[in-house]
């Protein structure tokens, strides 16, 4: 779907934003670019829709070089969501959503149906919201409109540049839940920039870790946790502290992971020190970051083991269900 082939971006002052990027993004994949500030992730994203020009190399979309596309058609067929939201303040919600469909000369009936469909998909009642101005919406509601505006003309690719980072923790968590639910329905190719490892793990099918303009590791969340390519990836992940108290509505314990049936019932025989089932999820997470699996002690008896994958699944389920596991 999207292929980077020896892609570099440098500037006249000698600065290099990205250096010789080589990776592919599959159709329907939720692909996350992550790394410290200044690593080149936003530049990488913006090169896809030619907001930033390449210095060297080639980007292909569906086996066609991006510079062979008409630039306006290229951008109309790629949705783009910014951190700053960027809704037009003088336009209503429906007028904001309709911009690209109107540029593509959709008929009015089709546009109105699409607006209704999209607003319902993010739980915004069309009759209540479509005639409001952006100033009448909360930050989370504005960002929802920003997301569905990017989807309005049904593009196959959506670019998202730290879209939730300016929101409060509750709104951010809800938007993450919405994205998980929405992506299951729409199955778009999404390229998502974030600096938040927890967000990357919750959303990404694959995560591309960048440093100093280069790709350090591009893998599934499970592979990055269990097999970090080098100490930078390992340290970056650990410093990200994916366990955040604000993520959950209460303090979870090891036993909550087991109640969710996320553990192996067989006992570990490798001599790894056990963890009591009354310990916090944070303590468990710190252990599984360093060890493949941790034996669970219930009232002095080892009852099973929990792995990295179990903890990630628990966090993902928690996000999808709004912070409460039944």
Image: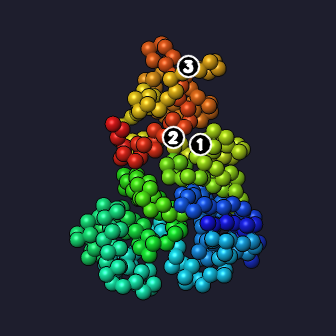
| Quarter that holds the N terminus | bottom right
| Residue with the most extreme top position | 300
Q: Residue at x 62, y 81 (%)?
A: 69
Residue 284 locus on image (x, y percent): 51, 30
Q: Secondary structure at mark 1?
A: helix
Image depth: mark 3 or mark 2 in front: 3
Q: Nearer the viewer, residue 19 or 114?
A: 114
Q: Residue at x 54, y 78 (%)?
A: 75
Q: Which residue is mark 3?
A: 267
126 lies left or right of 229: left
Residue 264 locus on image (x, y percent): 52, 27
- Circle 3 packing at 10 Å, graded few (<14), some (14-19), many (20+), is few
- State whether residue 251 appears in this view: yes
User: Which is nearer the N-term, disc 1 or disc 2?
Assistant: 1
Q: Residue at x 58, y 46 (%)?
A: 221
Q: Which residue is mark 2?
A: 312
- Circle 2 packing at 10 Å, graded few (<14), some (14-19), many (20+), is many
Residue 113 locus on image (x, y percent): 32, 75
41 lies left or right of 283: right
Q: Secondary structure at mark 2?
A: helix
Q: Which residue is mark 1?
A: 222
Q: Are marks 1 and 3 in contact (CB under 8 Å)?
A: no
Image coloring type: rainbow
Q: Are marks 1 and 2 in contact (CB under 8 Å)?
A: yes
User: Which is nearer the N-term, disc 3 or disc 2?
Assistant: 3
Q: Secondary structure at mark 3?
A: loop
From this view, report whether residue 300 is shown above or below residue 96: above
User: Which is nearer the N-term, disc 1 or disc 3?
Assistant: 1
User: What is the spatial separation of the Cα atoms under label 1 and label 2, in whole angstroms?
Assistant: 8 Å
Residue 175 locus on image (x, y percent): 40, 57
């Amino acid at each position: 779907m999207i292929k980077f082939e020896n892609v570099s971006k440098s500037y006249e002052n000698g600065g290099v934003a990205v250096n010789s990027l080589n990776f592919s993004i599959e159709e329907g994949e939720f692909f996350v670019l992550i790394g410290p500030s200044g690593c080149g992730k936003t530049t990488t994203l913006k090169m896809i829709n030619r907001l930033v020009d390449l210095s060297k190399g080639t980007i292909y979309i569906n086996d066609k070089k991006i510079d062979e596309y008409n630039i306006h058609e290229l951008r109309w067929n790629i949705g783009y969501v910014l951190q700053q939201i960027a809704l037009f303040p003088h336009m209503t919600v429906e007028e904001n959503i309709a911009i690209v469909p109107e540029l593509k000369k959709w008929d009015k009936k089709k546009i109105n149906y699409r607006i209704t469909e999209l607003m319902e998909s993010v739980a915004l009642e069309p009759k209540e919201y479509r005639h409001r101005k952006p100033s009448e919406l909360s930050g989370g509601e504005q960002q929802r409109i920003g997301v569905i505006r990017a989807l309005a003309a049904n593009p196959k690719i959506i670019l998202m540049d730290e879209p939730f980072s300016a929101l409060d923790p509750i709104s951010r968590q809800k938007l993450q839940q919405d994205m998980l639910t929405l992506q299951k329905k729409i199955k778009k190719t999404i390229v998502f920039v974030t600096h938040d490892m927890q967000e990357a793990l919750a959303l990404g099918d694959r995560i591309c870790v960048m440093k100093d303009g280069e790709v350090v590791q591009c893998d599934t969340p499970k592979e990055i946790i269990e097999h970090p390519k080098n100490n930078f990836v390992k340290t970056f992940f650990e410093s990200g502290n994916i366990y955040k108290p604000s993520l959950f509505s209460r303090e979870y314990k090891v036993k909550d992971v087991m109640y969710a049936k996320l553990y192996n019932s067989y006992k570990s025989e490798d001599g790894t020190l056990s963890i009591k089932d009354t310990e916090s999820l944070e303590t468990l997470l710190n252990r599984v970051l360093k060890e493949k699996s941790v034996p669970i002690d219930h009232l002095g008896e080892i009852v099973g083991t929990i792995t990295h994958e179990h903890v990630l699944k628990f966090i993902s389920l928690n996000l999808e269900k709004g912070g409460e596991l039944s």
